[in-house]
Image: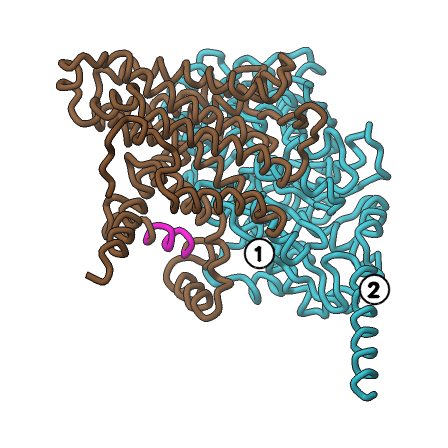
Chain colours: A brown, B cyan
């Protein structure tokens, strides 16, 4: 069964033959994907991977440490601007600029973690929300960051490798995503991860047990901001152009929604949530192409909602999916997975 | 034997098919030309969605008249909610799944910049971006043709008219904290330099600002006689309203973005009357006459009246509003349609670009549009329209033409 007898079993990566098999299949599938899929789907996969990185980080903060952030678009913006500015002004190579920008975002995360020591729940949500809004206003004033006119991302080269197609970028992005996912998973199983969980479950109890609240809460913010920063740095090269208004409140809300819909406090959850919602975000546009249902939805929207038909129904379907997941499975997609797994384990009883 | 003949025939048909597809231009068939466009239909920029719907109705009108050289225009437009990641996704999908011959219009600077490299690397023409940004022509691209007159020009003509005709010496500006506002600031300063004047006050306005009292206080303190409003329609309404309440009544000047006078009168509850705004088309000072009034809801320009009857009345949804945004969607793509007509039946992208470059003083429902052969060092070869004129909003919702067309100067962006 799932009983673990020692610590090494807990941190072991390939816990069973089935896991080894499925993870290898996944890695092979991810490697082959860009060779069989159309370029457009590779772009979609890149977009999903960036969201996965951010949401894994956000989940460390929200799901494991029990804090909340409505300002992750701010860290995302710092990462994006940091990477581009370090490359264009300081001539850093990309592989150095990206983690440095992530660390700058982490620095801001640490600062934002300080008020989090005194704030909880909705109060913390508002404080982080304020941060998210403010940071883009400040960026819009800084001359070397292009003010309100935005910045162009430079050509992306790593040594002799010119990354100018979605497929090239995919082979850079997917290993980074896997590396960061494994890092997060391992972090959760260390002393730090246990401290995060202790804070989430009862912070006063954790403190009496010797968990340094100041250190671990600010650390959780910093780590989470680092992930968002790295995601932002990569995002700048997907769009190749960034401006302050991209990093809106809506973006922060989306990240949080992805974490919650995926299932907080798990490793699979944020990956599933970010992948699903990022996919829907880009692909729901195509629902009208589905035979019969598409035509029916369009007529419905045109008659009752808007003259454009297409777009509003897209938002309505998106909202309905969110409501349905939360209503039937408050643990999110991860909860659905657990239930399915249990059902098959017990089958046919 | 019969079977063998059949398979030989099948192979020949396949080879012929391959040869035909290889020689034909992407997005063009015997009967169709596929044209892509993006634009927000949802989200904060949704009011700009009418641009794409205007283009759509215009293309349908052309198709109803028999298309262009026997081909129908198939218009693929999608909602990107003003989110560049979605714009890029939509364009990539359209290009890779169906294959567009060209893209037209497309609202917004950020969404446009996200797809610019993708289109230019593939040599796909993009005509008439729906945003007055210098990024489109600086540096110029062979396959990207601007048509929207830059906001720099609005500021130049407003200051010229304000000083030379109305005799104002104290100009102030409220400018949106972005590229649009910055162009206003630069254009105004350049023009005022010619008269040895300086802006007496320049106040940035953030998109999120709601309280305009501090702004008005500063204008009042500087004793501004004329105030340029390089902000969105909502902020224009707030500034004029707050000014009125604080008994500050300068001459208000606004831009082409607030040139839809019936709409502006409605959102300011009549306070917009007397405001002078720049215009880039939908009226023609030459045809209507300076000093005369024009009701944009019942256009007197024959071409515009035709579009209202043949495109808007027949193909727009019944809730659609006839206004600047909708008609702009037609105006931006007129030069492209003209180029398609000039190319003739043998249609390729290179030929469209060649014909676009030959367009000189083309006149549709906007101002004169001209391009020149591609020169990487000359932004003006792709600028399109450089002229604007001024109109005054009247209390009855009509517009009085104040000036003739005025050709404005291009001021390059700082590097």
Residue range corresponding to the magenta coloring: A313-320
Left or right: A102, with B389 as reference point: left
Q: Which mark is residue B19?
A: 2
Name the image quarter holding the N terminus of chain B: bottom right
What is the C-alpha distance between the residues marked 1 and 2?
A: 52 Å
Indicate the position of residue B210 as horizontal and vertical percent values.
Answer: 37, 27
Q: Residues within 10 Å of mark 2 (few under 14, many from 20)?
A: few
Using the rendered image, report if marks 1 and 2 lie on a common chain: yes
Indicate the position of residue A302 as horizontal and vertical percent values.
Answer: 43, 62
Left or right: A205, with A214 as reference point: left
Name the image quarter holding the C terminus of chain B: top right
Q: Vertically, is B316 above or below B177?
A: below
Residue at the image point whose x is 40% and y is 15% from the top: A108
Q: Secondary structure of the magenta portion, mostly? A: helix
Residue at the image point whose x is 45% and y is 46% from the top: A281
Q: Which mark is residue A206?
A: none
Asked whether residue B387 is drawn in magenta, I would say no
The local secondary structure at tag 1 comes to loop
Q: Vertically, is B171 above or below B384?
A: above
Q: Viewer-proximal residue, A292 or A346?
A: A346
Name the residue that disc number 1 marks.
B298
Q: Vertically, is A138 above or below B288?
A: above
């Amino acid at each position: 069964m799932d009983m673990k007898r020692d610590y090494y079993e807990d941190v072991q990566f390939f816990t069973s033959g089935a896991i080894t098999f499925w993870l290898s299949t996944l890695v092979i599938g991810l490697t082959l994907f860009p060779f069989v899929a159309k370029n457009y789907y590779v772009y979609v996969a890149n977009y999903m991977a960036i969201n996965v990185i951010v949401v894994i980080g956000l989940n460390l903060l929200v799901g494991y440490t029990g804090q909340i952030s409505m300002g992750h678009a701010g860290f995302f913006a710092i990462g994006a601007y940091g990477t581009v500015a370090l490359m264009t002004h300081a001539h850093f190579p990309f592989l150095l600029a990206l983690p440095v920008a992530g660390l700058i975002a982490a620095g801001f995360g640490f600062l934002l973690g300080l008020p989090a020591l005194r704030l909880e729940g909705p109060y913390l949500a508002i404080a982080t929300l304020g941060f998210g809004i403010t940071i883009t206003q400040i960026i819009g004033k800084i001359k070397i960051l292009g003010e309100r006119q935005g910045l162009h991302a430079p050509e992306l080269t790593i040594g002799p490798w010119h990354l100018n197609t979605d497929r090239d970028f995919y082979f850079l992005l997917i290993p980074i995503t896997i590396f960061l996912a494994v890092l997060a998973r391992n972090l959760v199983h260390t002393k730090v991860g246990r401290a995060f969980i202790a804070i989430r479950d009862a912070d006063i109890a954790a403190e009496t047990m010797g968990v340094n609240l100041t250190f671990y809460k600010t650390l959780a913010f910093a780590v989470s901001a680092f992930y968002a920063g790295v995601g932002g740095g990569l995002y700048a090269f997907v769009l190749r152009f960034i401006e302050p208004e991209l990093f809106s409140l809506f973006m922060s809300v989306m990240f949080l929604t992805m974490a919650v819909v995926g299932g907080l406090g798990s490793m699979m959850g944020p990956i599933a949530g970010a992948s699903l919602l990022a996919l829907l975000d880009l692909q729901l546009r195509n629902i009208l192409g589905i035979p019969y249902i598409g035509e029916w939805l369009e007529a419905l929207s045109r008659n009752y909602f808007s003259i454009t038909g297409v777009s509003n129904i897209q938002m309505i379907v998106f909202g309905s999916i969110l409501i349905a997941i939360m209503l039937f499975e408050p643990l999110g997609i991860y909860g659905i997975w657990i239930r399915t797994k249990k059902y098959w384990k017990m089958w046919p009883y | 034997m019969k079977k063998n003949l059949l398979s030989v025939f099948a192979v020949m048909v396949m080879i012929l098919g391959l040869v035909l597809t290889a020689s034909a231009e992407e997005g063009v068939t015997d009967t169709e030309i596929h044209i892509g466009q993006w634009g927000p239909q949802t989200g904060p920029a949704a009011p700009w969605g009418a641009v794409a719907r205007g283009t759509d109705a215009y293309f349908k009108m052309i198709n109803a008249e028999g298309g262009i050289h026997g081909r129908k225009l198939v218009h693929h437009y999608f909602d990107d909610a003003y989110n560049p990641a979605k714009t890029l996704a939509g364009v990539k999908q359209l290009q890779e799944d169906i294959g567009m011959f060209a893209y037209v219009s497309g609202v917004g600077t950020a969404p446009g910049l996200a797809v610019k490299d993708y289109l230019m690397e593939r040599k796909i023409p993009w005509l008439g971006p729906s945003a007055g940004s210098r990024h489109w022509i600086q540096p110029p691209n062979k396959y990207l043709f601007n048509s929207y007159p830059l906001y720099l020009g609005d500021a130049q003509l407003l200051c010229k008219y304000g000083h030379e005709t109305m005799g104002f010496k104290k100009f102030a500006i409220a400018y949106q904290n972005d590229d649009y506002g910055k162009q206003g600031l630069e254009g105004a300063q350049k023009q005022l330099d010619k008269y040895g004047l300086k802006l007496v006050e320049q106040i940035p306005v953030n998109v999120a600002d709601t309280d305009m009292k501090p702004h008005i206080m500063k204008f009042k303190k500087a004793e501004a006689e004329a105030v340029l409003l390089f902000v969105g329609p909502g902020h224009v309404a707030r500034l004029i309203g707050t000014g009125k309440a604080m008994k500050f009544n300068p001459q208000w000047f606004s831009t082409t973005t607030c040139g839809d006078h019936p709409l502006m009168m409605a959102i300011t509850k009549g306070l917009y009357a007397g405001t002078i705004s720049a215009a880039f088309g939908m009226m023609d000072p030459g045809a209507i006459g300076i000093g005369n009034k024009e009701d944009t809801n019942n256009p007197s320009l024959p071409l515009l009246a035709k579009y209202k009857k043949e495109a808007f009345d027949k193909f727009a949804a019944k809730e659609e509003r006839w206004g600047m945004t909708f008609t702009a969607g037609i105006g931006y793509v007129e030069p492209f349609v003209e180029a398609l007509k000039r190319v003739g039946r043998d249609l390729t992208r290179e030929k469209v670009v060649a014909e676009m470059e030959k367009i000189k003083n083309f006149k549709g429902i906007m101002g004169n549009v001209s391009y020149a052969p591609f020169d990487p060092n000359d932004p003006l070869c792709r600028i399109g329209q450089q002229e604007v004129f001024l109109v005054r909003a009247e209390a009855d919702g009509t517009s009085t033409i104040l000036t003739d067309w005025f050709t404005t100067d291009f001021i390059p962006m700082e590097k």
